[in-house]
Image: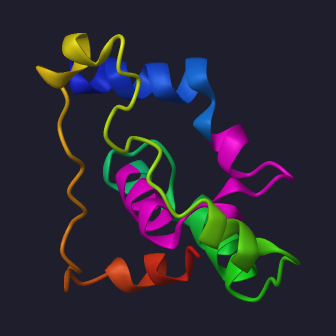
Amino acid sequence: VNDTKLITLVKLELRIDRIVTCKLNPLKVVNPMVGGQFVKALYQNKVMERSMLEPILRRNANLVVRGAAELAEEMSFFPFDPYLLYASKGHIDAIYENWQGEADSDEEGDEWVAGVG
């Protein structure tokens, strides 16, 4: 699948834009590092325009969600932490890759993503 077809699939079939902009506001309650990487990927891969993402990030920067800090602390694991289902672990170990976050980038224009969390 080429990149253009994949982006079209994500835009039209998965409707990521509706998920990101929904009332549940997933970018506010997700781990800020994961949310930042997700927003960068959406923008860099042209899945969502910066003009759609910036208002969400600005709103979230000023939004206080009761219990969000406690939730973030309890859910501080990355959803793809090492596979712990021992009965099927042998099938996964060969293809599992540890997630490595990107080092903080100094790329011009990335500072707008800082308000994810």
Image height of 63 relative to 74, above or below: below
Tell whether position 20 is magenta.
Answer: yes
The structure residue drawn at horizontal position 24% and vertical position 26%, both measured from the top left corner, is: 3
Q: How many marks?
A: 0
Image height of 45 relative to 27, above or below: above
Q: Is residue 69 left or right of residue 85?
A: right
Residue 40's spot in the image, x, y percent? 38, 61
Query: Does residue 71 appear in this view?
Result: yes
Tell whether position 9 is magenta.
Answer: no
- Where does the magenta region start and end? 17-41
For this rendering, which residue is in front, 76 or 50? 76
* Display colour scheme: rainbow
| Image-quadrant location for residue 102 | bottom left
Residue 49's spot in the image, x, y percent? 50, 55
For this rendering, which residue is in front, 86 or 99? 86
| Image-quadrant location for residue 91 | top left
The structure residue drawn at horizontal position 51% and vertical position 71%, both measured from the top left corner, is: 32
**Image quadrant in which the N terminus is located:** top left
In the displayed image of the protein, which residue is found farthest to the front?
86
